[in-house]
Image (spheres, rainbow, N blue to C red):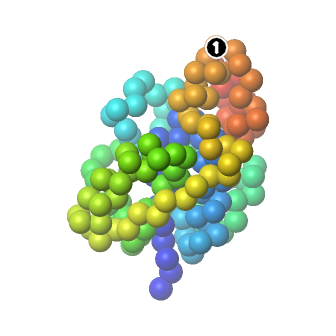
Amino acid sequence: MSQIAVVPGSFDPVTLGHLDVIGRAAGLFDEVHVLVVHNPDKKPAMFEAVDRVRLIEESLVEVGTPGTVRVGEWTSGLLVDYCRQVGAKVLVKGVRSGEDVAYETPMAIMNRHLADVETVFLLPDASRSHVSSSLIRQVSSLGGDVTPYVPKAVATALAAR
């Protein structure tokens, strides 16, 4: 029986930190589903969900992520419903700080309660632990160079905006 994990996020845009966590998950599980999810607390989105899926797919090829990685989106319903649908028993969340852990812990407990889905927290490479999508959006919108923190496909898409 293969182990399937889901790596959910808004990925608006995907960063090298996200790709690092996805790559680590791909090394731990037989199949990884990277899932662009709608977060109503994060408005407005810089990129539409379909564009984020495309950017993630292009970025995974660019960095050469190993293993079986599928990319999709989930726009309605509980995340654990998607997990049930694909047979995933694990959610993988990248955490950069204690603040991230505090934010993610109640959701992890609820997901375990609702559907017996465990959450695994992975730390990104230390060189990327300060990078977030919101910081990338802000720096980029003010004309700053974000190329050290995002894949080429994202840098190109940001420059075109």
Give me the residue at 29% from left, 60% from top.
109
Depth check, front residue: 108 or 63: 108
User: Where 34 falls versus 132 (above or below)?
Assistant: below
Percent position (x, y) of residue 153?
A: 71, 37
User: Residue 140 in the image: x percent, y percent?
Assistant: 65, 21
> Measured along the vertical axis of the image, is residue 28 above or below residue 123?
below
SS under mark 1: loop
- Label 1 crowding class (10 Å Cα cut-off): few <14, some 14-19, many 20+? few
> Which residue occupies 61% across, 29% down?
136
Q: Which residue is mark 1?
A: 142
Task: Answer left or right for 28 relative to 110.
Answer: right
How many numbered callouts?
1
In depth, the one of 156 and 98 nearer the eye is 98
Relative to 105, say whether 137 is above or below: above
Q: Residue at x 72, y 40 (%)?
A: 151
- Tell which residue pokes out farthest to the top in this image: 142
Query: For the residue marked with disc 1, what is the amino acid?
Result: Leu
- The image quarter containing residue 131 is top right
Q: Toward the viewer: 131 or 38?
A: 131
- Residue farthest to the front? 98
Residue at image position (51%, 26%) is: 46
**In the displayed structure image, the side of residue 117 where residue 9 appears, left or right:** right
Residue 21 in view, yes or no:
yes
- Counting from the top left corner in percent of width and height, residue 160 is at 68, 21
In this picture, residue 29 sits left or right of residue 76:
right
Residue 86 can be seen in this image: no
Query: Looking at the image, which residue sits at the far bottom?
Result: 1
Q: Considering the image in quadrants, where does the C terminus appear?
A: top right
